[in-house]
Image: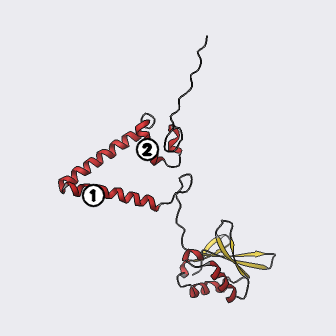
Amino acid sequence: MAEKPQPVKVLYCSICSLPAEYCEFGPDFEKCKPWLIKNAPDLYPHLLKEANEKEAEKVSEQLQSAGISSSADGAASSAQPGNTSSTKQEEVKRLPGGKIKKKEKQEVVIEKVVRNRRKCITIVKGLDLFGIKLSDASKKLGKKFATGASVVKGPTEKEQIDVQGDISYDIVEYITETWPAVPEAAIFFIEDGKKVPAA
């Protein structure tokens, strides 16, 4: 008679709740490493080596600091690198899936879109990155160029200003005069799908 197959026991990570073999593909592998070293050292032998090397480095640093200065100073100096790494972790924003959010470049992009063959819309993106309220900016642009201007959400879910008509000839000068925080070097046009500096 054939033996009954036994159920397989799977070890799950208590940090990311994935099987231990798949922790490296999880959202934050760095948080799982201490748990994996303690509970599943055979799955990730290179983690054990890294941990031993780090411990050896810490011990050598403590010995060197103790030899150079008093033990209290050595403890303080060994605590400072830990503090800097925690502040770096706070600065970096993580999105779902472990992706790091990048800071947006401060630039104003002006694009002219033609619709119905003759009518144009000038789209102004990025004024909000300079701390300018888009509703106030759209009112000023509408008054200056005697046309309709409104704040709308673009295809990337970011707010932009749509101004009726082709005002790209005067808009750079008006933006730099009205809002001195926006340098002329940070203003770009989109022509034929390419970003071209206004200056």
Q: Amino acid at mark 1?
A: Ser
- Looking at the rendered image, the quarter that the N terminus falls into is top right
Residue 191, percent from left and from top: 66, 74
Label 1 crowd (10 A; few <14 / some 14-19 / many >=20): some
* Residue 8: image location, x then y, percent: 55, 27
The residue under label 2 is: 33
| Dot 2 amino acid type | Lys
Left or right: residue 170 compared with residue 62:
right
Q: Are marks 2 and 1 in contact (CB under 8 Å)?
A: no
Q: Secondary structure at mark 1?
A: helix
Nearest the eye: 24 or 35 = 35
The x, y position of residue 187, in whole percent, is 58, 78
- Left or right, residue 149 beside residue 46: right
Q: Residues within 10 Å of mark 2 (few under 14, many from 20)?
A: many
Label 2 sits on a secondary structure element that is: helix
The colour mode here is secondary structure
Q: How many marks?
A: 2
Q: Assign the C terminus to one quadrant of the image.
A: bottom right
Mark 2 or mark 1: whose residue is earlier in sequence: 2
Residue 77 got which mark?
1
* Residue located 53% across and 29% down the image: 9
Residue farthest to the top? 1
Report x, y in % for residue 88.
42, 60
Q: Is residue 18 above or below residue 63?
A: above
Report the disc number at residue 139: none
Image height of 180 relative to 124, above or below = below
Q: Is residue 30 above or below residue 199?
A: above
Name the residue rendered at 64%, 69% in the picture.
158
Distance from Cα at disc 2 to Cα at disc 1: 25 Å
Residue 95 relative to residue 30: left or right: right
The residue drawn where x is 70% and y is 78% is 150
